[in-house]
Image (tube, rainbow, N blue to C red):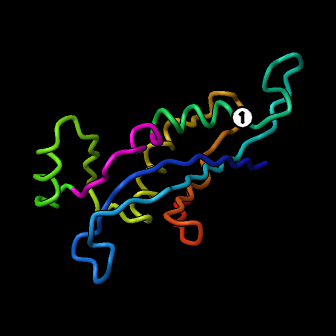
């Protein structure tokens, strides 16, 4: 069985050396979908009976590990020195330095990497992270798959 839940967050970024508008500082209303697979839990008189995982637990993990870290932050590539220097000049600015250019593809892959270890088979139901889908816009997204 597979389940999917969705969360949203706002963040800024830029794609250095991009041929078009994305080379400028800008932001998006991102959405992230987390898809898990596993057996349906069959434990009478338990909160998660009949579920793969409680959606509130899926969301709480994703919020703590990814969404709250990236929400209202500027995601900047570690080698984008011009922007890094600028952001350092802003007192108490929320900046997330990324090892790769913060494209939708790289962000989806990074979220998958972070979340994979968070959704372990702790329920004994073969729980597995299958997909992280990151929407940069309502019509454009990237999928990171297991």
Q: Position of residue 109 (x, y in %)?
A: 44, 57
**In the image, what residue occupies the spot 19% across and 55% down?**
78
What is the residue that sits farthest to the top in this orientation?
45
**In the image, what residue occupies the spot 59% across and 66% down?**
138
Q: Position of residue 54 (x, y in %)?
A: 72, 32
Report if residue 70 lies within the magenta region: yes
What is the residue that sits farthest to the right in this orientation?
44
**In the image, what residue occupies the spot 16% across and 58% down?**
83
> Measured along the vertical axis of the image, is residue 88 above or below residue 143?
above
**In the image, what residue occupies the spot 73% across and 47% down?**
3
Report if residue 73 lies within the magenta region: yes
Disc 1 target residue: 53
> Measured along the vertical axis of the image, is residue 65 above or below residue 95?
above
Position of residue 47 in the picture relative to residue 98 (left or right): right
Q: Residues within 10 Å of mark 1 (few under 14, many from 20)?
A: many
Q: Quadrant of the C terminus?
A: bottom right
Q: Which residues are magenta?
A: 66-77
> Measured along the vertical axis of the image, is residue 54 above or below residue 109?
above
Mark 1 secondary-structure assignment: loop
User: Which residue is at the front of the view, 89 or 131?
Assistant: 89
């Amino acid at each position: 069985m597979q389940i999917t839940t969705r969360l949203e967050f706002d963040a800024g970024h830029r794609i250095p050396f991009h041929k078009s508008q994305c080379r400028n500082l800008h932001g998006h209303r991102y959405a992230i979908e987390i898809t898990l697979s596993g057996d349906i839990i069959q434990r009478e008189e338990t909160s998660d009976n009949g579920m793969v995982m409680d959606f509130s637990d899926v969301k709480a993990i994703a919020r703590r590990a990814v969404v709250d870290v990236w929400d209202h932050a500027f995601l900047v590539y570690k080698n984008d020195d011009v922007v890094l220097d600028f952001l350092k000049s802003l007192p108490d600015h929320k900046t997330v330095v990324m090892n790769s250019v913060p494209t939708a593809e790289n962000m989806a892959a990074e979220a998958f990497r972070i979340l994979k270890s968070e959704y372990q088979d702790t329920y004994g139901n073969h729980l597995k992270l299958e997909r992280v889908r990151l929407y940069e816009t309502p019509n454009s997204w990237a999928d990171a798959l297991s």
